Amino acid sequence: WAKAEGRGRWAVYDPERSARDQARSALAAGLPGALDRDEFVVHYQPIVSLADGRMLAVEALVRWQHPELGLIGPDRFIGLAEETGLIVRVGQWVLERACRDAAGWRAAHPDTTPVVSVNLAARQADDPGIVDTVARALTDSGLSAELLQLELTESAVMGTTGEPLRSLRRLAALGVRLAIDDFGTGYSNLAYLRRLPIHCLKLAAPFVEGIRAAGDNRDEQIVDALVRLAHALDLRVTAEAVETGVQAERLRALGCDTGQGRLFGAPVEATEIAARLAETDGGRRWT
Ligand code: C2E
Ligand code: MG
Ligand code: MG
Ligand code: MG
């Protein structure tokens, strides 16, 4: 079960690892045709106001309805799609789908339509055609730019110069909102952050996870500082992965604007979001 790998070096055969590699190869083989076979679906997770519970936005999260393996989460195929460059086409498909769904909610519920927030991979943001792609998705769906937010990771935007930075500025000029996803997990240059046309920071799950009970713990102090920093830069703050009422209450007390997570609802199909909008039309709060 162990074989020599050159002089004095040993590699241990790991059956779990090879099973994982096999599953990965199976996914990699099916991925290129998945778009043409129409196997991707988009689910939407509510983002609610911590002050009053209204659903102000939803995040579009892609899933792969695999013919044999069932519904597969993005953590298992987005990395592959990024490596192969396929993410540019998949991401465009998600964007178009999300804009059409949001335009549908808008038509039925003009006063309470949530902003739709779409993840943009670094390769998409760097693509010279990104501004045209976004502009066309808005025109084709009839969605107004203010109802679209694009989420980029710190690593995708930090240090961006030249054409990609101009793209971000042009997207912002269209009226589209930009958010930094998983904020606090990567490297952010605060001086640089100020120069970006960003609307919102999404606080990464680990900080929210660290908030357990009222009282001062280190994660709560970090969130406190980050919220102050964001507000000083005139940015809104969304907390990700909010799972408990205690977390929601502490985040609200710290001035965090919106929250997203199991507490407020898992990602669901577009029709389910429409049903929730219909429920709240009569003035009912969503939470
Ligand atoms: P993300 O953008 O940070 O999305 C939030 C993730 O947190 C989602 O995972 C969501 O289902 C999960 N989540 C929801 N509620 C909770 C909770 O209460 N606790 C915790 N711990 N997590 C929660 P999901 O759907 O598996 O997506 C994983 C990642 O895949 C996303 O992370 C995003 O980076 C990427 N992704 C998803 N859709 C797309 C897409 O269309 N394009 C690109 N480029 N990336 C995508
Ligand atoms: Mg997942
Ligand atoms: Mg995201
Ligand atoms: Mg995130």
Image (cartoon, grey):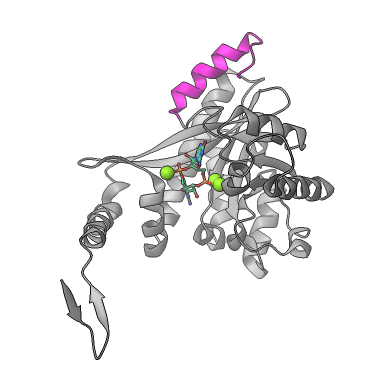
What residue occupies the far left of the structure in this picture? 1
Q: Which residues are magenta?
A: 268-287
Residue 1 within the segment the image draws in magenta: no
Residue 246 appears at what percent x and percent y?
64, 30
Task: Indicate the position of residue 91 as horizontal and vertical percent values.
Answer: 46, 49
Left or right of 155 in this view: 41: left
| Dominant SS in magenta | helix
In the depicted structure, whether residue 14 falls above or below residue 3: above
The residue sitting at 45% across, 29% down in the picture is 268
- Quadrant of the frame with the C terminus: top right
Q: Quadrant of the N terminus?
A: bottom left
Q: Is residue 19 above or below residue 276?
A: below
Q: Residue at x 66, y 40 (%)?
A: 238
Residue that appears at 46% across and 37% down? 97
- Whole-percent x and y of residue 179? 65, 48
In this view, 85 is above or below 236: below
- In this view of the protein, which residue sits in the foreground, 273 or 24? 24
| Left-right relation of 75 to 12 | right
Please, which residue is most extreme toward the top here?
Answer: 282
